[in-house]
Image (spheres, helix red, strand yellow):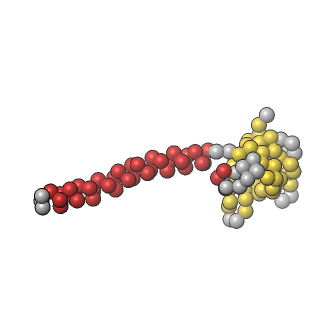
């Protein structure tokens, strides 16, 4: 018995990190992939070309933990503003970048 315990302890010591990495890495990768691909729905209320901003009435922003509301967002790429107009329905991704809520992906929908 005294020889089995150290052998078992060593085996578990080396097996646990490998199991933990495989088990959790798969779950966190799937969760991360789901979050990064999720887009929120909204409607453009105002386009401000001079300021590089959009006013969007949107549903919940799951990745930011925000409820549905109307608010102003910066856009990561000013060219996004050329593709939308007030009244357009959109799917978008907003992220907090340098302390400002910023639209990083934007697609118009029908």
Check the image and name the residue furthest to the front. 1
Nearer-the-camera pick, 52 or 31: 31
Nearer-the-camera pick, 7 or 105: 7
- Judged left or right of residue 27, residue 110 is right
> Which quarter of the rendering shows the C terminus?
top right
Q: Position of residue 104 (x, y in %)?
A: 69, 51
Quick check: 64 above or below 110? below
| Residue for point 61% across, 44% down | 37
| Residue for point 34% across, 56% down | 17
> Which quarter of the rendering shows the N terminus?
bottom left
Q: Position of residue 10 (x, y in %)?
A: 22, 59
Number of numbered discs: 0
Give residue 11's quadrant in the image: bottom left
Check the image and name the residue furthest to the top. 110
| Residue for point 67% across, 56% down | 64
Nearer-the-camera pick, 55 or 49: 55
Give residue 109's quadrant in the image: top right
| Residue for point 87% across, 45% down | 86
Nearer-the-camera pick, 97 or 81: 97
Q: Position of residue 25 (x, y in %)?
A: 44, 50
Q: Position of residue 47 (x, y in %)?
A: 85, 51
Is residue 92 shown to the viewer in this render?
no
Is residue 31 shown to the viewer in this render?
yes
Give residue 4's quadrant in the image: bottom left
């Amino acid at each position: 018995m005294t020889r089995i315990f150290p052998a078992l302890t060593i085996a578990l010591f080396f097996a646990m990190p490998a199991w933990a990495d495989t088990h959790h890495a798969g779950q966190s990768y799937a969760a991360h992939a789901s979050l990064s691909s999720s887009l929120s729905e909204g409607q453009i209320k105002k386009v401000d070309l001079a300021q590089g901003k959009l006013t969007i009435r949107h549903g919940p922003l799951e990745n930011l933990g925000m409820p549905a509301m109307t608010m102003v967002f910066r856009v990561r790429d000013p060219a996004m503003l050329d593709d939308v107009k007030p009244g357009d329905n959109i799917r978008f991704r907003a992220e907090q970048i340098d302390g400002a809520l910023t639209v990083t992906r934007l697609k118009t929908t029908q």
